[in-house]
Image (tube, rainbow, N blue to C red):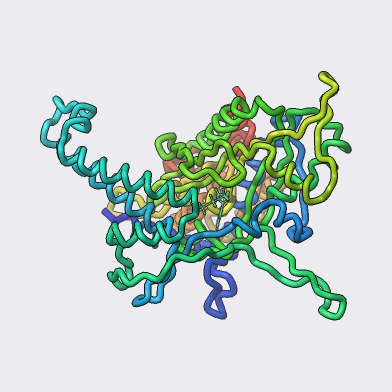
């Protein structure tokens, strides 16, 4: 069996070969951690965005959307804390000249202890068979206890250092744990330094006095600065939410793992404004809602888990991540944060404007608290692609690569194929496609054998292939071939619309979420 790393490499190659994701400006050898979406990628991405947007805007009468500009007044980022505190601790290895995030190196070390523990447990499970009492083993095995002690001590020390942003202590942890550079294998580290992740540029001509502005590192602030506009013009009553999808930019220190960590990426964020004191209730509500949204896609419930934050950001009083099992382990796809009234209060302070909510029931004004749900479109894209990518052995020794994408998200819903390029079959196929194309993204393919055409569609995840043959001309039926089962069925042309429509209707997912 191929290792996870090999599978991931194949997935990246597949994304390029089939028009999902290309390296940016590839003819100039690309630009690190920047990617372009191709003809199929953009369809999948748009479908993901629509699934998210409609789940917010259609399913909630108290959530509205906005589309704020990427450039914002520079004071925004003073107020939000990003100018002073949006830093990662970086460290260089002098031999390999590679740069790392100190926190990531330490977290990987913690994960190594976890791995050791799991390996011990797995070994014991094998040894003891059915009589194995895992809980007891974990509590009594000397090996496990020893690893667990070391792990917990390291974890406590790390959390304290991160909370205090004690750079010298982070370095000391790396030294004490004897962490080596994965490239050079040496411990020849520089000191840990802070690195601000915001990109900046100049607005206006120099003669006028150019202003240094930032490319937004998150979309959330565009929502906060519009809180009053939306609340007043929309006559919104608390609790209510504002949703937004848009680009964000971060000068990531280590940009690896394909579209998992990019320097230009897209976020889907929703800020939900609530009465102070009710935020924990709403935090739990959104935690549960967002997980249901993920699971409704049917990629496998076991592939998700929550990860509560050890180190809370400067603005948060509770935070959790929804992690997905990528080929390189469980990784954050979405963050759910209770942001208190930090952002609105800061903007009130820096702008001198009163940013509050007048509660008509109590005749009192207050600064609302905020629950944020923040998900990266690109990470969502990657999680779906990794769950969908499948290499299958077929009977007769053949293999196929199939993308088992959720039908609602598939870039192409149906491919119409005349069996041969003559006898009026192409015309009939075109006529069928012309009816379907108003509602579904369809493809037309008349080249090569039917088998080859099926494989091409499997590779981009098309759920339905529709073959027009000579009998179609007289019986008005076609052969529908299903992507996942490869089963074929003879179906009346007039039944096609319903067949596809039922399978790709987002309503089916929404019902799973809200029931
Ligand atoms: P990480 O710890 O992985 O750097 P984060 O905790 O800084 O992520 P948030 O600031 O909570 O991320 O951003 C919300 C979401 O935006 C993340 O869950 C992720 O899906 C996405 N995201 C953040 N940074 C990137 C990036 N560099 N590339 C792609 N997506 C990103």
Above or below: residue 444 compared with residue 312 = below
Give the percent coordinates (x, y) of residue 16. Answer: 50, 65
Give the percent coordinates (x, y) of residue 119. Answer: 21, 44
Q: Is residue 111 visible?
A: yes
Above or below: residue 429 compared with residue 198 = above
Residue 241, picture quadrant? top right
Q: Is residue 13 visible?
A: no
Residue visible at 70% across and 56% down? 77
Residue visible at 48% across and 41% down? 309
In the shown orientation, is residue 123 left or right of residue 186? left
Residue sitting farthest toward the left: 127
In the shown orientation, is residue 329 left or right of residue 277? left
Q: Nearer the viewer, residue 204 or 465?
A: 204
Residue 120, picture quadrant? top left
The quarter of the image holding the C terminus is top right
Q: Nearer the viewer, residue 44 or 93?
A: 93
Residue visible at 49% across and 38% down? 489
In the shown orientation, is residue 190 left or right of residue 2? right
Residue sitting farthest toward the top: 361
Residue visible at 68% across and 68% down? 200
Q: Nearer the viewer, residue 70 or 397?
A: 70
Give the percent coordinates (x, y) of residue 355. Answer: 81, 40
Number of numbered discs overlaid on the protein picture: 0
Above or below: residue 154 compared with residue 33 = above
Give the percent coordinates (x, y) of residue 155. Answer: 36, 46
């Amino acid at each position: 069996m191929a290792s996870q790393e090999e599978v991931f490499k194949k997935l990246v190659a597949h994304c390029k070969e089939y028009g999902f994701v290309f390296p940016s400006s590839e003819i100039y050898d690309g630009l690190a951690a920047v990617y372009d979406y191709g003809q199929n990628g953009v369809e999948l991405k748009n479908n993901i965005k629509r699934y998210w947007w409609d789940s917010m805007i259609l399913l909630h009468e108290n959530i509205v959307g906005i589309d704020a500009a990427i450039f914002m007044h520079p004071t925004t980022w003073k107020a939000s804390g990003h100018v002073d505190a949006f830093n990662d601790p970086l460290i260089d290895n002098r031999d390999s000249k590679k740069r790392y995030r100190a926190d990531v190196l330490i977290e990987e070390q913690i994960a190594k202890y976890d791995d050791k523990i799991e390996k011990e447990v797995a070994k014991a499970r094998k040894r003891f068979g059915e009589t194995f009492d895992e809980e007891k083993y974990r509590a009594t095995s000397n090996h496990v206890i020893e690893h667990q002690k070391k792990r917990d001590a390291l974890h406590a020390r790390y959390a304290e250092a991160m909370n205090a942003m004690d750079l010298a202590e982070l370095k000391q942890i790396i030294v004490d744990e004897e962490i080596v550079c994965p490239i050079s294998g040496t411990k020849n580290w520089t000191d840990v330094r802070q690195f601000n992740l915001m990109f900046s540029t100049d607005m206006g001509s120099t003669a006028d006095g150019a202003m240094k502005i930032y490319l937004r590192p998150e979309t959330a602030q565009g929502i906060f600065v519009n809180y009053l506009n939306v609340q007043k013009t929309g006559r919104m009553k608390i609790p209510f939410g504002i949703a937004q999808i848009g680009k964000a930019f971060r000068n990531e220190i280590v940009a690896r793992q394909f579209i998992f960590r990019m320097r230009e990426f897209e976020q889907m964020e929703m800020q939900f404004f609530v009465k102070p004191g009710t935020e924990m209730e709403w935090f739990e509500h959104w935690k549960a809602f967002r997980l249901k949204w993920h699971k409704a896609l049917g990629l496998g419930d076991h592939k998700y888990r929550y990860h509560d934050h050890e180190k809370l950001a400067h603005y948060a009083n509770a935070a959790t991540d929804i992690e997905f099992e990528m080929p390189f382990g469980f990784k954050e796809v979405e963050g759910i944060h209770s942001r208190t009234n930090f952002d609105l209060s800061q903007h009130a302070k820096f702008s001198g404007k009163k940013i509050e909510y007048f509660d008509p029931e109590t005749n009192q004004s207050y600064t609302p608290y905020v629950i944020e749900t923040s998900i990266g479109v690109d990470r969502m894209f990657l999680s779906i692609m990794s769950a969908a990518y499948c290499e299958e052995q077929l009977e007769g020794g053949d293999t196929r690569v199939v993308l088992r994408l959720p039908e609602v998200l598939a870039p192409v819903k149906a491919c119409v194929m005349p069996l041969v390029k003559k006898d009026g079959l192409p015309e009939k196929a075109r006529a069928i496609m012309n009816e379907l194309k108003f509602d579904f993204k369809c493809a037309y393919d008349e080249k090569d054998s039917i088998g080859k055409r099926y494989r091409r569609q499997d590779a981009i995840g098309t759920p339905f292939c529709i073959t027009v043959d000579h009998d179609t001309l007289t019986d008005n039926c076609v052969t529908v071939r299903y992507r996942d089962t490869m089963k074929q069925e003879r179906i009346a042309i007039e039944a096609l619309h319903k067949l596809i429509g039922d399978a790709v209707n987002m309503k089916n997912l929404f019902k799973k979420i809200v029931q």
